[in-house]
Image (spheres, helix red, strand yellow):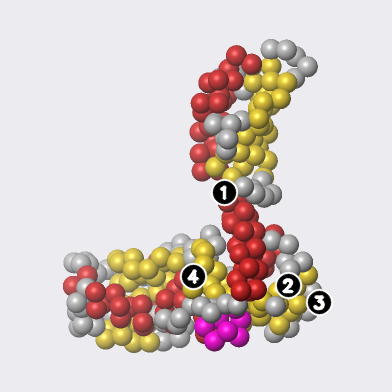
């Protein structure tokens, strides 16, 4: 029986549960306990603080976990990172007062830096041969310079709004992070097989999240040019219409360049374009 640790509450909780639900795994029971049985897969869900997830997985209390790469790197414990999950994206950066005319990373020599990520910061400072005083605090790192506790901070940034609110600016991006599936390094054969099944489902879901299903009507003589624009996975599906001069094309397109492709198809005479969410992409 597998057990997966996820964040009990906080930024990763909802998307972890959504990913599990999309993979056909829902926690049974109406109110949340420390451990919930799941329906749809032989797995238990263990709800923890994100800081505790790497250790729970390293110890084998849970065989799997979903946690930020930042926590995995900071704790430095022996776990295997199986796959990035595409959510919880952020970076950990050095930030200084907005008013500072920042000359480069050497500025940090002899300075005091407040952070909740001392291990990652230490690694970065060592790599850059900088001697600075690391001041570890658990929360509200961004207020440390204003209250005179530090000259700079090393903290998670996502939109950058928190830095601006505190009159700080990001000067060095040190670590990029997103949620990741981690595993205990000594999984049994049975747990390895189940984990592979789970990863297959996660991969399908994550791939489909980046894709759209597009269908449209197009004059038959424009099909070769349309196929050159949207080759699809193997090749587009073409279905006949009652009107012999037209057909319907169906294709899966990465959502990043969806609108470019649609404009090009319209120029070829495509009409009645439907863009649909893709539930799952199983290759
Ligand atoms: O209670 P528990 O210990 O489980 O939760 P927590 O409070 O330690 O963590 P939580 O829920 O805040 O974050 C969990 C994980 O989400 C982190 O470890 C990161 O991997 C990821 N993540 C993604 C973030 C952010 N984005 C984020 N923006 N974690 C924190 N922030 C904070 C950041 O600390 C700063 O205060 O948001 C603020 C910055 O945001 P912007 O958008 O203003 O730049
Ligand atoms: Zn935490």
Residue extent of the magenta highlight: 57-63
- Give whichever of discs 3 and 2 has the lower sequence position: 3
Q: Crowdedness of circle 3 by 10 Å Cα count: few (<14), some, many (20+)?
A: few
Residue lying furthest right: 30
Give whichever of 114, 87 is nearer the camera. 87
Establish whether ligand 1 lies closer than 8 Å to the Cβ of label 3.
no
Residue ID for mark 4? 81
Q: Crowdedness of circle 2 by 10 Å Cα count: few (<14), some, many (20+)?
A: few
Q: CA distance from mark 3 to mark 1?
A: 32 Å
The nearer-to-camera label among 3 and 2 is 2
The nearer-to-camera label among 1 and 2 is 2
Q: Position of residue 102 (x, y in %)?
A: 22, 67
Residue in the image at 65% along x and 63% along y: 197
Q: Is residue 60 magenta?
A: yes
Residue ID for mark 3? 29
Residue 56 horizontal side relative to residue 278, left or right? left
Q: Quadrant of the rendered structure where residue 244 is?
A: top right
């Amino acid at each position: 029986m597998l057990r997966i640790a996820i964040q009990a509450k906080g930024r990763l909780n909802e998307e972890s549960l959504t990913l599990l639900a999309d993979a056909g795994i829902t926690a049974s029971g109406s109110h949340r306990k420390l451990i919930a049985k799941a329906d749809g897969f032989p797995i238990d869900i263990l709800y923890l603080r994100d800081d505790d997830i790497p250790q729970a997985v390293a110890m084998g209390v849970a065989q799997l976990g979903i946690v930020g790469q930042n926590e995995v790197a900071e704790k430095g414990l022996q776990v295997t990172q199986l796959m990035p999950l595409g959510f919880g994206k952020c970076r950990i950066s050095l930030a200084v007062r907005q008013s500072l005319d920042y000359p480069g990373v050497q500025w940090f020599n002899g300075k005091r830096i407040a952070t909740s990520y001392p291990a990652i910061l230490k690694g970065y400072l060592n790599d850059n041969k900088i001697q600075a005083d690391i001041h570890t605090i658990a929360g509200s790192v961004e207020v440390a310079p204003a209250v005179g506790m530090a000259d700079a901070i090393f903290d998670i940034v996502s939109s950058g709004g928190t830095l601006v609110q505190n009159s700080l600016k990001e000067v060095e991006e040190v670590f990029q992070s997103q949620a990741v599936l981690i595993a205990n390094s000594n999984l049994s054969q049975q747990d390895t097989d189940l984990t592979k099944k789970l990863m297959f489902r996660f991969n399908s879901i994550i791939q489909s999240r980046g894709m759209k299903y597009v269908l449209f009507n197009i004059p038959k003589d424009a099909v070769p040019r349309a196929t050159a624009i949207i080759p699809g996975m193997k090749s587009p599906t073409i279905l006949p219409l009652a009107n012999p001069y037209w057909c319907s094309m169906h294709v899966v397109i990465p959502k990043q360049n969806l609108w470019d492709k649609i404009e090009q198809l319209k120029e070829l005479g495509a009409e009645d374009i439907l863009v649909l969410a893709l539930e799952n992409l199983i290759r």
